[in-house]
Image: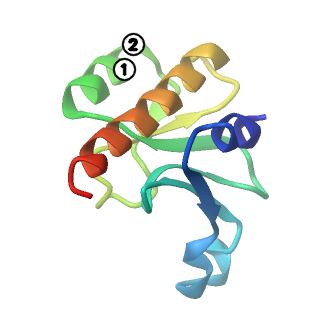
Amino acid sequence: MLRDYCLAMEGMTEKTPFGKFSRRFESTLVFYVLDHMFCMADMDDFTSVSFRSTDEEIARITERYSAVTTPVNKAMKFWLRVNLNEDMPDYEIYRLVSRAYDIVKDKFQKIE
């Protein structure tokens, strides 16, 4: 369902780019807009979703929901990981994924 939601966004593409680094990452599906990542999830173990955000939003969302954790890769400074089926409602996850798409699209649309 999340994949269908992302695929419906204009100019969105999907890839599995991390398998070349390690077999354990072969199932990480990454969604892109303007060739930049905005969301990702593991297709085999769909227990969480990670997406782009802002410092301000990360602080606010983290305070509000216990489902929010840090991304697997700590270098992803402006990203959140949300554990699914916890205290964040699905509609909020979809809203935040849409927001992640907008953040990335707005940032890189100006560059092109």
Q: Residues within 10 Å of mark 2 (few under 14, many from 20)?
A: few
Q: Are marks 1 and 2 in contact (CB under 8 Å)?
A: yes
For disc 2, the marked residue is 64
Name the residue rendered at 46%, 17% in the picture.
65
What x and y, as percent, mark residue 28? Answer: 64, 63
- Does 82 appear above or below 62? below
Q: What amino acid type is highlighted by mark number 2? A: Arg
Marks 1/2: CA distance?
5 Å
Circle 1 SS class: helix
Tell me where residue 71 appears, x and y as whole percent.
Answer: 43, 50
Residue 89, visible in the rendered structure: no
Q: Residue flagged by tag 1: what amino acid is it?
A: Ile
According to the image, label 1 marks what residue?
61
Query: What coloring was used for the rendering?
Result: rainbow
Please state the horizontal and vertical placement of residue 36, each as a whole percent of the image.
40, 58
Residue 110: x, y in percent? 22, 47
Q: Is residue 13 positioned above or below 70 on the image?
A: below
Q: Is residue 104 above or below residue 87?
A: below
Specify whether residue 109 is in view.
yes
Give the quadrant of the N terminus. Answer: top right
